[in-house]
Image (cartoon, rainbow, N blue to C red):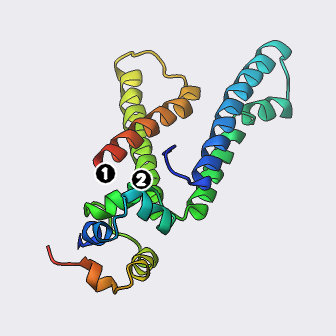
Amino acid sequence: MKNRLRVLRAERDWSQADLAQRLEVSRQSVNAIETGKFDPSLPLAFKLARLFETTIEAIFSDEN
Amino acid sequence: MDCKTNNSAVWRFTRRFIVLSLLYGFFSGLSAYGLLLWHPTGIVIWLLAILPAIPIAMAVLLTGRYMSEEKDDFQRAVLVQALLGGIGAILVVTTAWGILENYAHFQRLNILMIWPLYLVFVGISYGIVKARYR
């Protein structure tokens, strides 16, 4: 699944570790989601959307 | 487990798992010592035989507890894949070895080695799974 996490993170000048800390997950989780190797659960997707003050659809796209 | 994360569930699981693995070694030795030197009879034989299996059962329960406590979906998914890899490897190896034992006169595999071997396979599998996500 494609996502805009890297862009959203860069806009806030956050490292993967910073984002991981805010989400209460490991940095490896953030990296795996960001690179599209792992799809987050729905609760984590909502958490991401809340954190970036946007919608899940604005972060993730199911287009291949 | 990933030691770089601030994940208390991982640390608790790892610590307890190491203790249980040490207990398995200790109980295996104790059972062997007891059966060979004390020559027990009746129910004591069964109790000594079951003793090393108790830490294994506890390790399985501990894994289940970790799965329910772990809030990080990714870490949980990695562990599930590593455990699956370990189970697959131990089944393949013991099945092939069984055939070799029965029909090719290979040396008998000590069944007590299956648990330590399984842990080795899970460890290798964990490394492979983690490398895939890098």
Q: Which residue is mark 2?
A: B78
- Which residue: 81% across, 12% down? B37
Provide the residue designation for mark 1.
B133
Q: Residues within 10 Å of mark 1 (few under 14, many from 20)?
A: some
Q: Quadrant of residue A2?
A: bottom left
Vertical placement of A21 versus B117: above or below?
below
Tell me the mark number nearer the camera, choosing from 2 and 1: 1
Q: Residue at x 28, y 85 (%)?
A: A57
Q: Is residue B53 visible?
A: no
Q: Name the spot of residue B100 as percent of width and height, x first.
A: 36, 23
Identify whether B64 is placed above or below A59. Answer: above
Q: Residue at x 55, y 34 (%)?
A: B115
Indicate the chain on which mark 1 is placed. Answer: B
Residue at point 31% right, 51% down?
Answer: B133
- Is there CB contact under 8 Å for labels 2 and 1? yes
Residue A45 in view of the camera: yes
The amino acid type of the residue labelled 2 equals: Val
Pick whichever, B67 or A4, lies toward us: A4
Question: Residue A10: horizontal and vertical position, in percent?
Answer: 28, 66
Whole-percent x, y for residue B125 in the image: 39, 41
Q: Is residue B103 above or below residue B1?
A: above
Farthest residue in the top direction?
A: B37
Q: Amino acid at mark 1?
A: Tyr
- Residue situated in front as seen by the camera: B66 or B46: B66
Q: Position of residue B35 (x, y in %)?
A: 78, 20
* Alpha carbons under labels 2 and 1: distance apart: 9 Å
Chain letter of the residue carrying label 2: B
